[in-house]
Amino acid sequence: MSILRSINSHLDAEMLWIVKETASSLFDKNGGTVTRGNLCKAIGRVVGEVLINRVGDQVDRLGTPRRLTVEEFERAGLDSLMGISDEGPRKDADAVILHVAEACILYAHVRLMGVKSAYNVTRTYGDDYSPFGQEGGFCNPMKLKMMD
């Protein structure tokens, strides 16, 4: 099955109903006003929950599990807001939630194809090393002169 067909298969009537009901209940709970960020996180969360339920934990050819987490879908949903065109945020909430749902489904497929998550990154000691930010610097004559 092609990736586009697979993505469209996940954006089915059940997923659309879940997404619209989630948005509706979020608006009801908050008196009719919801920030776009909270809306995108909520949609990302429910899309992630549905997709994790549908695809489960899959493994790659080497047997390494490709675990999807709800938290990464929340962040992907929030980040997808930045990808909406300028006219997008002015549109109604239905256009925004559909955009977020599509982006999260695409994100899930990219993850299942083996691309590592940008959200589940483990940092180790030394990852933040910057030769220009350390004392003495990296070929930074001004810092070397100040040290003398």
Image (cartoon, rainbow, N blue to C red):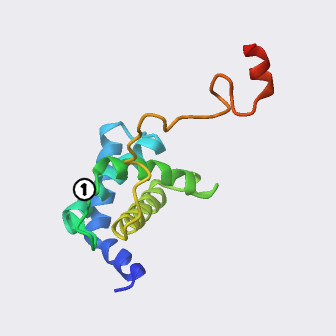
**Is 117 rendered above or below residue 11?**
above
The kind of residue tagged 1 is Glu
Tell whether 40 sits left or right of 68.
right
Tell whether 70 sits left or right of 83.
left
**For mark 1, does the 10 Å Cα neighbourhood hold few (<14), some (14 to 19), or many (20 or more) residues?**
some
Q: Secondary structure at mark 1?
A: helix
Along the line of sight, the residue nearer the viewer: 64 or 4: 64
Along the line of sight, the residue nearer the viewer: 60 or 135: 135
**Is 80 rendered above or below residue 8?**
above
Residue 50 visible (yes or no): yes
**Is 32 rendered above or below residue 56?**
above
Q: Position of residue 58 (x, y in %)?
A: 23, 67
Q: What residue is at 30 percent from the left and 57 percent from the top?
A: 48
Number of disc labels: 1
Residue 33, quarter of picture: top left
Q: Position of residue 9 (x, y in %)?
A: 32, 78
Q: What residue is at 48 percent from the left and 61 percent from the top?
A: 95
Tell whether 107 sits left or right of 55.
right
Q: Which residue is mark 1?
A: 49
**Is 81 rendered above or below residue 103?**
above
Residue 4, quarter of picture: bottom left
Q: Residue furthest front?
A: 148
Along the line of sight, the residue nearer the viewer: 148 or 120: 148
Along the line of sight, the residue nearer the viewer: 56 or 16: 56
Q: What residue is at 37 percent from the left and 65 percent from the top?
A: 105
Q: Position of residue 55 (x, y in %)?
A: 23, 68
The quadrant of the image that shows the N terminus is bottom left
The quadrant of the image that shows the C terminus is top right
